[in-house]
Image: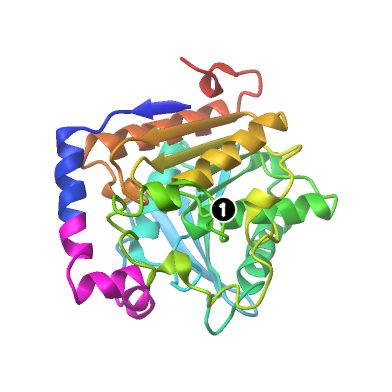
Amino acid sequence: MHKYENTPQGRVVRDLVARVYNDNLIGRKLKNGEMRKRMSEPEWKVPAGYSFSVIEQTNFAMEFLEPEEPNDRLVILQLHGGGYVGNMINAYRNFAGLLSELGQRACVLSPDYRVAPEDPYPAALEDAVVSYNWLLDNGYTEDQIVLAGASAGGGLEMALCMYLKDQKRRLPAGIVAMSPWTDLTRSGSSYHENFHKDVVFGNTTDSLIFNKEYVRDEDTTNPYISPLYGSFADFPPMLIQVGGDEMLRSDSELVAKKAKEAGVKVRLSVYEGMFHVFQMALLMIPESRTAWREVGKFLTVIQDEKETRFYGEE
């Protein structure tokens, strides 16, 4: 496990986030996902030097960000967060741009997969499979694909690998998981230890992580819903990042432990004092800058299978 200390700048941003989420009206709607469902945003500005296209599928749409002279050795399949109830937002389009840059101008495919309550499990997983297949049908190979996901998307990418493995299919080359939601049973100790520390989900059970709209009456120990309960044998290398104050911290720690025991290369990085998907701060605070640099290093290392130092203790 790699730990990063909380910086003064990080504490300031955490406290600002806490003020917003503690607001009696806005904070409640943010925590329970009501605002996330209704979010409307201005049109996203495509970065210079990139083309952006929307690819319609039968049940959903995918967004493809392609740089001029793209890196033909790597493509990133990004699965956005939102507690399985929120659609694609500009924050994750910004993630796509940064992932592309850190991947040395890699193309990024971001499915706007179906979400609950209209489309509960297994809709999101089905759309993730369709997106993975689309990349293969369009000339990419499994060893060129890296999955990247935050929150629910981080759990979904692991569920996708669980599914592919059960189908005896080849897995992608790597996984980047930011604050992944891997245990919808909420069995980890951090759900109790960080209940009053978590500025995004804490101090209430009226929040996205207690929401049943996605799973309904399904078994929450199903590995396609909670990957923690599946086998990580033969999984690709993983970079897992999580905030130290998150209620979901255990989701990352338990998955990393289980994957390592199965022989998987895993780098687990805990950013002390940080909140859920703090990487949304992009390059504004030291913690998120370090996290994104780590992602860039992972995307470089993943193309060199002989490199192992990145995953071990430094």
What secondary structure is the magenta-colored segment mainly?
Answer: helix
Place of residue 71 in the rendered image (x, y in percent of width and height, measured from the top left): 53, 39
Which residue lies at the image location 40% right of the left edge and 35% below the top edge?
Answer: 270
Which residue lies at the image location 45% right of the left edge and 72% below the top edge?
Answer: 87
Place of residue 50 in the rendered image (x, y in percent of width and height, measured from the top left): 40, 53
Work out which residue is located at the far right of the displayed protein and give it.
Answer: 168
Identify which residue, 193 or 211, lies in the foreground. Answer: 193
Mark 1 surroundings within 10 Å by alpha-carbon count, few (fewer than 14), some (14 through 19), many (20 or more): many
Q: Which residues are magenta?
A: 18-41
In the rendered view, would you say 162 is above or below 30?
above
Residue 55 sits in quarter = bottom right
In the rendered view, would you say 84 is above or below 245?
below
Three-letter amino acid code of the residue under disc 1: Thr
The residue to which callout 1 is attached is 182
Q: Is residue 78 visible?
A: no
| Left or right for 187, reference 94 | right
Place of residue 102 in the rendered image (x, y in percent of width and height, measured from the top left): 42, 37
Place of residue 47 in the rendered image (x, y in percent of width and height, measured from the top left): 32, 54
